Amino acid sequence: MKLPFLLSVPHAGLTVPPEAAPYCALTPREIAEDGDEGAAAIYLGLEPLVAAFHTTDIARAIVDMNRAGDDRRRDGVVKTHTCWNVPVYREPLPDSVAEGLIGRYHRPYHRRLSELAAERPVRLAIDCHTMAAQGPPVGPDAGCERPWICLGYGDGTCPDAWIEALKELFERRIGAQVTINEPFGGGYITRMHSAEMPWLQLEMSRAPFLSDAEKSGLVRDALSELAGCIGAA
């Protein structure tokens, strides 16, 4: 029996789509550094365990699925600079190209999340990320050491008891390096889709407190136990 979760993994991709490639100034290393390094190894193998799963191979530096479609800041949906303040493009990206990227990749990603919420036997959706061990220049905590795990649910995008239970399950396995809403209280995906079903955001530090394989096992075990808690709620 599958766990009653929808997992979203929006920042594991490394692909620069062909419409953006002629303008892109980033090296493969810079593309990886702006995304969620380790997310593929940690989360993609969990797909067979859960009721619903969604990801993309498009790089976060090109289209950020965790931003609103009209967010045109430097670190918005179609970025001008990475989170490390590296310019993404050699010259300003034409508006027609930016709009095309949003239409081809961003909107379908969110449409599919809505479909999965309606189609599958899901009780909780989790937006899965990794985060730099220290806050990058573009971030709410630049230069600060981050916890090993941050769970975000804004002002209540899922029941308090569920996120507290998941925090306790992680703490039981790794100690007290687990926070709620600090430094991240959940992003656009969590806020946007919480009207459809309960959501939370899971951020796992890229600090080497465990290997990526061990981090994946940690998430698997915690979610397996959480399913029992939610089932009893």
Image: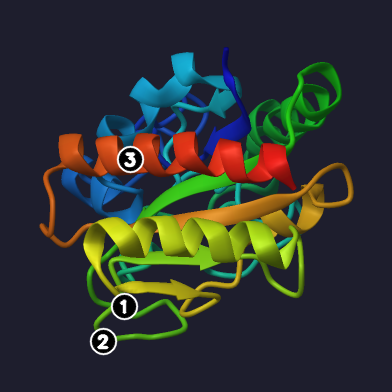
Name the image quarter holding residue 173: bottom left
Classify mark 3: helix, strand or loop.
helix
Tag 2–tag 3 contact (CB < 8 Å) = no
Relative to 43, 182 lies left or right = right
Front residue of 150/22: it is 150
**Which of marks 3 and 2 precedes in the sequence?**
3
Residue at the spot 54% in from the left edge and 44% down from the top edge: 226
Amino acid type, callout 2: Gly
Relative to 114, 216 lies left or right = left
Task: State the CA–CA distance, disc 1 to disc 2.
Answer: 5 Å
Q: Position of residue 107 (x, y in %)?
A: 75, 34
Q: Position of residue 188 (x, y in %)?
A: 69, 58
Classify mark 1: helix, strand or loop.
loop
Q: Is residue 4 above or below residue 82?
A: above
Front residue of 62/164: it is 164
Task: State the CA–CA distance, disc 3 to disc 1.
Answer: 17 Å
Task: State the CA–CA distance, disc 2 to disc 3.
Answer: 22 Å
How many residues crowd around disc 2 within 10 Å: few (fewer than 14), some, or many (20 or more)? few
Residue topped by disc 3? 39
Tag 1–tag 2 contact (CB < 8 Å) = yes
Residue 67 seen in the figure = yes
**Which of marks 1 and 3 precedes in the sequence?**
3
Residue at the spot 82% in from the left edge and 43% down from the top edge: 197
Amino acid type, callout 3: Ala
Residue topped by disc 1? 135
Residue 143: mark: 2
Residue 76 seen in the figure = no
Tag count? 3
Q: Position of residue 127 (x, y in %)?
A: 56, 46
**Which of marks 2 and 1 precedes in the sequence?**
1
